[in-house]
Image (cartoon, rainbow, N blue to C red):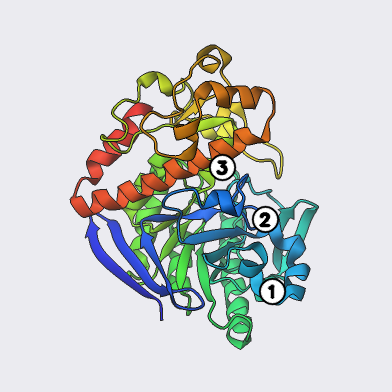
Amino acid sequence: MMKVLLSNVVNGCRVGSITEVGRHGNKVLEFPGCLLYTRCGSAPHLTYDVLQKLDTVPEGVQITLPTLAEQHHVVKDFQQGIGKFTGMEDFFLYCSVQDPAVREATGYNFNKGVSVWGPGGRIKLEVADFMAIQKAFRPDWYQCLCDGDTASADTSTKRVRKSVDRTLNFLDQCLEIHQKSQELKGSEILGVIEGGDLLEERLRSARETCKRPVAGFVLDGFQSFAMERETRKNLLKAVLEVLPEDKPRIIHAVSRPDEVLEAVECGVDFFDSSFPYQVTERGCALVFPFSKRSHSDVCDETMIQGPDDSSQETTENQHCRGSIEDKRSQRTKFEMDLNDKEKYACDFRPVLPGCSCYCCQNHSRAYIHHLLQTGELLARVLLMMHNFHHYFGFFAAIRESLHQGTFQELKTMVTQRTK
């Protein structure tokens, strides 16, 4: 049976591990940690063999339902689950309702279900449809069907309350089917905390979800574009105080380094790793420092001169339904824009001096710039390798800092470039 082992709680930050997790009870997940972000069941741009070249790949993998929902009949006929089907059977698999790298379309949910957007367009999922997919996929954990369509600034209080009511209703229906299902024996269902930016509704959602037999909690709707930073921080603190300490907490679409550190301080355990993918899609490389030893020779000029304030992301994220958040205007000060001809066409240094990833050990900024300009697929492969490597190392540094009592030093190091 799954066990949450807290090594320490430092000023709200939780550090520890979850043991005996997975359908076979043989996995260990360390937290604070992130899940490997996937599309169509595999790491973006990377084959399984290339993925193995990365250091510190997380044990946990996030399966994004919109990218796979249309194939669930094939997976069902396969009869061995999504892990075996995608070649990821050695990982711990968590299935999320939405894709954190894509801005969720608004106005398409309904009383009996929600909408997700696959390659072929809109997919309407009622509880029975959703649970049929989970039976075919057989993940280790899966997020309950939820109505998270409350991110818009003009969402009414009535609509927020309805989202909480719907999500609780969906959870009850999912639990009923889950408990009777032989296919989902060994799988765990996670309850979802909704409530928009209303404290009263967030707390109601949290308290009611705690009454159900869920294995953990998903904190939904805390994206940068959904609310101001201070509002998010206050809501997270209030909600997490209500949740039991012996169950994991996952948050979606909060994966920028500064946002991650704030959420860790509030008590969040697990994050998605969609941010490295979004950076890769922009033709950029992560270069923010998190270790004095390995990044002592990183110069200020590697940081792009771009927007960082969370408040302006609200306008930046105005893109059409289903599009990847890859606009150049969304670059952050955590990344280097290798599309820049003036800076990098003749720069033969590694992407990030001191980085041990395959990309930095074997290729230069100029080469990556050339690949981007010529539209070579290899550009995204190499950038994805570097960005995942850097991001996973960041989480290892967070855990180490919490064990050593240097978390505030790490936070200063990561965020000072954004001020």
Q: Residue 288's image quarter?
A: top left
> Which of the labelled discs sits on residue 258, or is there none?
none
Closer to the camera, 372 or 61? 372
Q: Tell me the quadrant of the picture where the N terminus can be found.
A: bottom left
Closer to the camera, 313 or 401? 401
Q: Residue at x 61, y 47 (%)?
A: 44
Residue that mark 2 sits on: 40
Q: Position of residue 297 (x, y in %)?
A: 31, 25
N-terminal of the two: label 2 or label 3?
A: 2
Q: Position of residue 79 (x, y in %)?
A: 71, 77
Q: Residue at x 51, y 53 (%)?
A: 52
For mark 2, give the secondary structure.
loop
Residue that mark 1 sits on: 136
Q: Are marks 3 and 1 in contact (CB under 8 Å)?
A: no
N-terminal of the two: label 2 or label 1?
A: 2
N-terminal of the two: label 3 or label 1?
A: 1
> Which of the labelled discs sits on residue 277, or is there none?
3
For mark 1, give the secondary structure.
helix
Horizontal side, residue 414 vs residue 223: left or right:
left
Closer to the camera, 411 or 236? 411
Horizontal side, residue 339 vs residue 295: left or right:
right
